[in-house]
Image: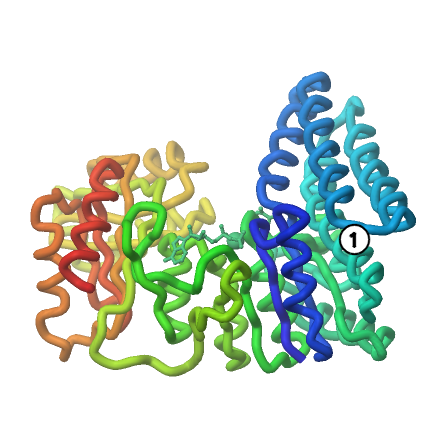
Amino acid sequence: MIVLKFGGTSVGFADRIKEVAKLVSDGQRKIVVLSAMAGTTNRLEQIAGFLSEKKNVEANEIIDICEKRYLNTVDELFSTEEYKKRSKELVKSHMNSIRSFTVDLFTVFEEKTILAQGELLTTALFHFYMKEQGQRAALIAALDFMRINSDNEPDSNYIKENLNKLLNEHSSEEILITQGYICRNAFGEIDNLQRGGSDYSASLIGVATDAAEIQIWTDIDGMHNNDPRFVEGTQSISDLSYDEAAELAYFGAKILHPTSVLPAKLAAIPVRLLNTMKPDAPGTLISGKQKKNRITAVAAKDNITAIKIKSGRMFLAYGFLRKVFEIFESYKTPIDMITTSEVGVSVTIDNNKHLKDIVLDLKRYGTVVVDENQVIVCVVGDLVAENNGYANKIIEAVSHIPLRMISYGGSNYNVSLLINAKDKKSALNSLSKKLF
Ligand code: ADP
Ligand code: ASP
Ligand code: MG
């Protein structure tokens, strides 16, 4: 069994959906995980936002735009009147269910239900299309097997048991289609695996079915050695280790959702990143193999806040770091980077929800300086201490840019630099020039 996940751009309009259909129709049994059509989840978020503010007119305008787009796609996708009619009815029923949420009380429940409609629609339409094409395809509802627990972690046993039960029920079908991103929570309510989480769905499904390979199909030929949205001439990397891929995904390489690497790593299932527009390009293979002696890639993570806690006394002797970390723990706020000196410690966070309270608590232990609008630039590769000179090269490449923090030695695979957001593009470009 293999798992193939197609992202929003891969199912963004009728011709793309037809390409995906061709790609998966090779006679092999497989699970196809689909995201919502590109842009849909953003629109659904907007709709939910308007509805929660009781701006029903504005919400309805966007619902109408979505409906039109889907109805056009149906016209272009299907060739028979029967499937056109069935699909249009389906689109209208989903849109009407969103329209019905113009209720008095708009809660998280309604919001999550609205956010789920994109994936529910693409998979249902894709299923109809495969049937129209005469393929042996079945739709398996993610809401019947994908579940997170009360800590928002996937419930692996539940997923495995229920997914395999559903697969057995459809043992004669070749193409098993399901939704990425959406799931149920510990209360059985509709929930999701966070934005971009379809990659995570694919990974969890791959592990639950002991797949031979997890394929993430997107709009670019694999992981590039720098962010193609900011650097020209970036190149595809043929192979990455799980650790390298996880670092890059965590530090901003949008092609892969950060949580999606670990389950595959633990189950030793290879992950392949492929391009729907260029299916013959080799893409990137992520596996347990670590290539030696190379700097592999650069990524950047936005919206970082740096917090420096300076103690006048020799607090760092012992106990000080524990007290500082406990404050972040109490607000469930993870720390990304950390550097220490005799008199202080600097940390970064990417979640400012509790920033005010955290700062207030930290002030008990010293003076606190907060810098918002920072970026972590992360260089990934075989960066063990014995590879003398690599760290040097990295720092040299950004010698024209003020460095707020440097972190090296936390793992064997990364050097992280904290810089101002305005210097990001320049840093990424000069790192590419000097390192590749
Ligand atoms: P999908 O909708 O298929 O999930 P995403 O937009 O989430 O696609 O991810 C693909 C995008 O990730 C690419 O179009 C590219 O702009 C962006 N990206 C950022 N960093 C990298 C990188 N290092 N390598 C490849 N793509 C990257
Ligand atoms: N459709 C969801 C999103 O846009 C999930 C995904 O694309 O992975 O975030
Ligand atoms: Mg994505």
Dividing the picture into quarters, in which one does residue 76 lie?
top right
Say which amino acid is labelled 1.
Ala
State the scheme by which the image is colored: rainbow
Task: State whether residue 345 appears in this view.
Answer: no
Q: Which residue in the rendered view is the most extreme toward the right? A: 82
Look at the numbered disc 1 and give the secondary structure of its residue.
Answer: helix
The C terminus lies in quadrant:
bottom left
Left or right position of 27 against 334: right
Task: State whether residue 370 appears in this view.
Answer: yes
Identify whether 265 is placed above or below 309: below
Left or right position of 423 against 288: left
Q: Residue at x 71, y 17 (%)?
A: 57
Identify whether 187 is placed above or below 274: above
Dividing the picture into quarters, in which one does residue 105 lie?
top right
Around disc 1, counting alpha carbons within 10 Å, would you say few (fewer than 14), some (14 to 19), or many (20 or more)? many
State the residue position of label 1.
Answer: 124
Left or right position of 246 against 339: right
Q: Position of residue 257 (x, y in %)?
A: 49, 57
Q: Position of residue 237 (x, y in %)?
A: 35, 69
Q: Position of residue 94 (x, y in %)?
A: 80, 39
Q: Residue at x 65, y 20 (%)?
A: 53
The N terminus lies in quadrant:
bottom right
Nearest the camera: 367 or 393?
393
